Image (spheres, rainbow, N blue to C red):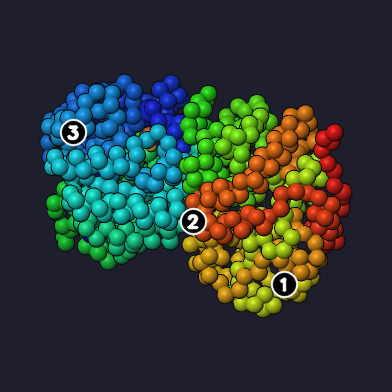
Amino acid sequence: MCFAANQHINPTNVCVLRNTCVFCSFARMPQEEGAYTRSLDEVFAEADAARDNPTREFHIVGGLHPKLRLAYYLDMFRGLKARHPTVHIKALTAVEIAHLARIEKRSVTEVLIALKEAGVTSLPGGGAEVFSPAARATIADKKLTGQEWLAVHREAHRLGLPSNCTMLYGHVETMADRVDHLLALRALQDETGGFLTYIPLAYHPDHNELGEALGRTGTATTGFDDLKNIAVGRLVLDNIPHVKTHWPMVTPFISQVALTFGCDDLEGTVVFERVYHEAGAGTPMWLSYDQIVGLIRGAGKEPVERDSLYQTVRTFEDWVPGQGVARAAGPEGPTFQISHRPRARARGQQTGPALQGVGSAERRDPSVPGRKPGGTLLTPGASPGVTRSMSRVRLGRIGYINCYPVYGAIDRGITPLAAELVTGTPSELNDLLAAGELDLSVVSAVEYARHARDYVLLPNLAISCDGPVRSVALFSHRPVGQLDDRTVLLTASSRTAVGLLELLCRDVWKVRPHFAQARAEAPDLDALAHLPHDAVLVIGDAALLLAAQHAYPHRYDLGEEWKRWTGLPFVFAVWAARRAADHAAVRAVHHTLLAARDWGLAHLDLLADAAARATGVDISDCRSYLAGLDYALTETHLAGLTDFFRRLAARGLVPDGSLQFLQVA
Ligand code: SF4
């Protein structure tokens, strides 16, 4: 089981893509607080600061600085080589190499040859993220494409520079994106044989715009996901000699376990890790020689120190902890300090790709022209710098395909909208409207009942069904009558569906399950399957996907159950505006929404096609799903809505109240 005694050096965090790589917490604009660019003397001093460590490899990556030229890097590598002749230099991602080629007006080949001549031994694998054009358009819109990243590595391999490869997972990518990414790496390895190791990298959500948009902090992946990625990577990439676990991202504990899940290589001593710790990684900044050896031995494996090219440097049969050459502590001083970005997006910079919300179907549908001008998903507690820079009316939009018929024309620029669009799950939009972060939004019907004193309803606009709805369902391992005292997971994304399920359980099915909340959006379904439960309430696109998987023997459509119980339609979502909002502006948006809905209902085939591409659900199923929903709010719908509110109020779940509408005349 091998590791390298390596040292990370990040010469600059200034990056021209700072506002478009929305998953990155490391980069800064040139004048932004925390921006730094090291002089060559500072880089040499940083390398010297770890001299007491038995460093065998410098791992050097940084931002795409608009003014740092190729000569700066060549002088750096020659200088490091002169000072540390036995240390390998693994430097510059494919993205940095392509950037240097662009600003030098030279070819990638010429830059690679110059790097090799200056002492670079191999290339790191960063910048690959996930190759899917749709995911890339969402998280790294202006970055090298996947094909371009592969082309740089292909050329490096041809020139005799081996490299590593990576995949960033746990953000907006789908499982299919992960598989496609691995297959692309595998294909290039078949062609060149130049990859040394594959390193899955877990996304970290703190201090970056994507994390804010997803409403996630801490870690975005589970230990299960981390281990699964490693195991799948090992199986698919059987032509790449090594798989490395990156402990700064997944913790030394997971890395230790990963050594029996397909990894034969452990990220090394590192000395000072900046990129992931600025994204909130709570792992140590470095591991000492003793710690690494102990970690590998603790997994029942024999440690082997390697160099950059996986040549054995030493083995440890006679190693006695505490008597090694490495110091236990890392280097100190201002160079070795982490400063988190005060805000995810640089002030005044609005050039980045518009983020769609968690589970947003459109994020996987780059053909929707409305993606870019679409809104940033805001969450309570999101950066004030983001939320308060908006001056127009702020309108919420659920990211599920069930909103396509209302927002499709707006997304395509067919119906101009004088408002800032904000995309999220129903629960997220509920909270944002309640917090005053939105002026109007589509919200859970039950949310209107809870805040009726603060909201007005927008007339003639709602999402309802008169029978099966298909996208709000209880999936159960046993008949619903057997759920007494059983565990039922409730999606954290909806309140109306939860309220309806509670009513059905008590008043219709006469069972009292134990309810527990769970994240149940489409990307969560794999993890959800491993949570102990007897049934789970899922809504939106995730419900359509789960139904297609046939993973549960029993499925209860809540729209159908309500209809059978009451004989009425069920209203899941309404459009509500804050009473304090500018009513003239809200009326204008209401008018736009009605016009957009008319266009949407006349173009269901087109919208079903977009929905199928976004979700992977069969197009005919998408078509019949959208056609089965109703977007009006007539007397019949109001009868269903008030009946639902009455039943909830009788249970003390919402206050008594009446429906108040926006005055549109
Ligand atoms: S991920 Fe790399 S290219 Fe993108 S902003 Fe961060 S440093 Fe720059």
- N-terminal-most mark, 3 or 2: 3
Q: Residues within 10 Å of mark 3 (few under 14, many from 20)?
A: some
Mark 3 sits near ligand 1, with its Cβ under 8 Å away: no
Q: CA distance from mark 3 to mark 2?
A: 39 Å
Q: Nearer the viewer, mark 3 or mark 2?
A: 2
**Residue pictured at 82% horizontal, 45% vertical:** 452
* Quarter of the image where the C terminus is located: top right
Image quadrant, ligand 1: top left
Please, what secondary structure does the residue beneath circle 1 have? loop
Report which quarter residue 429 is drawn in: top right
Q: Residue at x 66, y 66 (%)?
A: 557
Residue type, label 2: Gly
Task: Check disc 2 and report the residue beneath it.
Answer: 616
What label sits on residue 512 in the rendered view?
1
Residue type pointed to by label 1: Arg
Residue 109 — which label?
A: 3
Measured along the vertical axis of the image, is residue 418 above or below residue 273?
above
Q: What is the spatial separation of the Cα atoms under label 1 and label 3, in whole angstroms?
A: 67 Å
Foreground pick, 246 / 202: 202
Q: Is residue 475 above or below residue 159?
A: below
Q: Answer yes or no: is residue 19 visible.
A: yes
Q: Secondary structure at mark 2?
A: loop
Q: Position of residue 178 (x, y in %)?
A: 38, 54
State which mark lies toward you, 2 or 1: 2
| Alpha carbons under labels 2 and 1: distance apart | 35 Å
